[in-house]
Amino acid sequence: MALLVQKFGGTSVGSIERIEAVAERVIQTRQLGHKVVVVLSAMSGETNRLLGLAKQIDEVPTPRELDVLLTAGEQVSIALLAMALNKRGFNAVSMTADQVTIRTDNAFNNANIISIDTDKLESQLDQGKIVVVAGFQGRDSDNNITTLGRGGSDTTAVAVAGALKADECQIFTDVDGVYTTDPRIVPAALRLPEIHFDHMQTMAACGAKVLQLQSVEYAQMHQVPLRVLSSFEDGEGTLVTFNTQYSSQVVGIAVQRSQALIEIAQSMDALQQQLELFGLRFWMVANTAQSAQIVVAIDDLPRLRLVFDNKMRHISDVATLSMVGDNVMTVTDAVTTALNNTNIQVHHNKQITDCVSLLIDETDHQVAMETIHRDFVNSQEILGNPSLLAVS
Ligand code: ADP
Ligand code: ASP
Ligand code: MG
């Protein structure tokens, strides 16, 4: 008998029919004799709907109150799934983060899990119940409700799996694994049977939202076995692992869309301090003594406007395209040339050990991804087992 944590994302619980299908899948696992903890997201679109309500009141809502609001979505889905399981004769209980005792720091909207008390979870499992836990939420030391950042249910699942020493944390989603790039943008993308933790971490940090970055970091640090699977069809999915037989120059391409290139009339030192105080992710692309050009998420612009107001200029909408792989730096020039040949301008690039990021116009992202995927991912020899990835 194994102990499995199974997480289902928004699309997988997006309607009553889908919740019923999740119930059937969980029951299959239970009938194989395994103990199951399920972690759920809110039904698809629900968190955005709640966020939209908040923004009708205040473009920059009070962070504490936003977390009270947003956690409502997961409370709906866990109750519905527990009902669907009970109706089928399986004893299930839903639990909020407070009921489980998932403690976080007090960074509202982007909190980090500090500890998970396993007593209550274990006691429910020992009674033979399927436990359905609300993802994305926690409580800080003052008992305030917190959330773990967008996509945070992945992190709840991995942290619960780590705390319970589960045999595997299975992330069920609307694609059947981790691909060489987002298969919704590049249909020629290939599913990776395995991906190294380091590469998965870099892909997630660069925008591959199939796993939230913190969930990968947590799994890597606590050695939680992690697999990405489809909610809709059977398959092996992708194992995120420390040992992989697959190696290639460019493992994958991640894209970060909805970014803005902005200029702020302020010296870099002062600006950097303020941005770090906000906990805001940014890419510095140029600076002079009087001003700096940075790339930030479009969603962060209202907060920045509150502080910088008329010192700030929105230059253009951009996307960041990141190639991930051990020897990826060796192809930077060739990639830039290939993009220039398709009339795509690379405004800036930055390189870290296993990643090269290119700044391009938002409108170019799809052609750029298709070009790089065709010329630099799909065409390379994948060492270990070339047939599995069907490379040409
Ligand atoms: P969930 O609601 O299940 O958490 P997400 O929307 O957060 O699902 O993540 C799944 C989505 O991630 C896919 O639909 C796909 O568009 C996107 N994605 C981005 N990069 C990748 C990648 N490299 N492999 C697979 N999916 C990816
Ligand atoms: N419901 C939250 C979100 O939409 C958390 C999650 O889906 O993982 O970001
Ligand atoms: Mg997600």
Image (cartoon, rainbow, N blue to C red):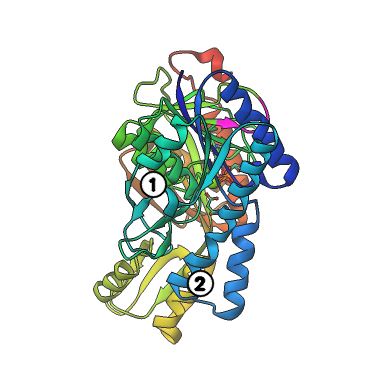
Q: Main secondary structure of the magenta part?
A: loop
Q: Residues within 10 Å of mark 1 (few under 14, many from 20)?
A: many
Q: Horizontal and vertical percent for residue 233?
A: 67, 27
Q: Horizontal and vertical percent for residue 163?
A: 34, 37
Q: Tell me which label, 2 or 1, sits earlier in the chain.
A: 1
Q: Is residue 388 above or below residue 377?
A: above
For mark 1, what is the residue? 214
Residue 231 drawn in magenta = yes
The amino acid sitting under disc 1 is Gln
Labels 2, 1: front one: 1
Q: Residue furthest left?
A: 269
In the rendered structure, which segment of residues is drawn in magenta?
Answer: 229-233
Foreground: 220 or 183?
Answer: 220
Foreground: 107 or 228?
Answer: 107
Secondary element type, mark 1: helix
Which residue is painted at 62% across and 69% down in the image?
52
Which residue is painted at 50% across and 69% down in the image?
66
For mark 2, what is the residue? 315
Q: Horizontal and vertical percent for residue 28?
A: 62, 23
Q: Residues within 10 Å of mark 2 (few under 14, many from 20)?
A: few
Secondary element type, mark 2: strand
